[in-house]
Image: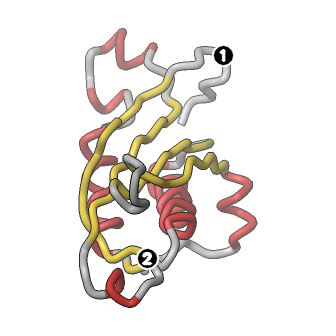
């Protein structure tokens, strides 16, 4: 992937919604809950803009499909773990220098619209893990 520091170009996905097993309370381990994700991914848009070809950019449909498959198959206790492992997966599979994501659980806290985490991970985080992240 091209170094995007010079351009600051980003692809984003907002409001990607799916369900998974997430939580540490007994009932949460038995019921699929809604999670909503926002992603920001670096990409140099200049070549794609010049050639008008999807092969010259990050295919956000492929990214979205991978995110949905990963999250739907997961069964983590903490949103922190789900977000971290998803970020590492995206770094590895799409050869990204970094990824920024927000993951929230709507209605998880009474009197609150949602609760969640916002993280940023880099290739250094991936390399420090020593192995490819697993989905569950």
Looking at the rendered image, the quarter that the C terminus falls into is bottom left
The kind of secondary structure element at disc 1 is: loop
**Quick check: marks 2 and 1 in contact, CB under 8 Å?**
no
Residue at 25% across, 80% down: 31
Marking on residue 6:
1
Residue drawn where x is 43% and y is 84% of the image = 25
- Count of picture labels: 2
Q: Nearer the viewer, residue 54 or 24?
A: 24
Say which element carries label 2. loop
Q: Residue at x 27, y 16 (%)?
A: 52
Q: Is residue 64 above or below residue 68?
A: above
Label 2, label 1: how far apart the Cα atoms are: 40 Å
The residue carrying pointer 1 sits among few (fewer than 14), some (14 to 19) or many (20 or more) residues within 10 Å by Cα, namely few
Local crowd size for mark 2, using a 10 Å CA cut-off: few (<14), some (14–19), many (≥20): many
Rendered location of residue 117, percent (x, y) = 55, 53
User: In this rendering, is residue 124 above or below 45?
Assistant: below
Circle nearer the viewer, 2 or 1? 2
Image coordinates for residue 76, horizontal then vertical, percent: 45, 78
Q: Residue at x 31, y 32 (%)?
A: 55
Q: How was the colour assigned to the protein in this rendering?
A: secondary structure
> Upstream in the sequence, badge 2 or badge 1?
1
The picture places residue 33, in percent across and down from the top left corner, at 28, 68
Residue 126 bears which disc, if any?
A: none
Where in the figure is residue 15, as x and y percent of width and height?
Answer: 30, 40
Residue linked to disc 2? 23
In the foreground, 22 or 119:
22
Left or right, 57 with reference to 40: left
Q: Measured along the vertical axis of the image, is residue 31 above or below residue 67?
A: below
């Amino acid at each position: 992937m091209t170094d995007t520091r010079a351009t600051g170009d980003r692809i984003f996905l907002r409001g990607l919604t799916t369900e998974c097993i997430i939580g540490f309370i007994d009932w949460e381990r038995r019921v699929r809950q809604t999670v909503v994700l926002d992603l920001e991914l670096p990409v140099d848009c200049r070549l794609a803009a010049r050639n008008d070809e999807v092969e010259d950019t990050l295919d956000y449909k492929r990214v979205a499909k991978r995110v949905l498959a990963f999250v739907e198959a997961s069964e983590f206790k903490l949103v922190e773990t789900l977000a971290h492992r998803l970020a590492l997966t995206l770094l590895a599979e799409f050869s990204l220098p970094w990824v920024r994501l927000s993951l929230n659980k709507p209605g998880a806290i009474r009197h609150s619209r949602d609760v969640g985490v916002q993280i940023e991970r880099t290739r250094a985080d991936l390399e420090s893990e020593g192995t490819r992240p697993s989905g569950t």
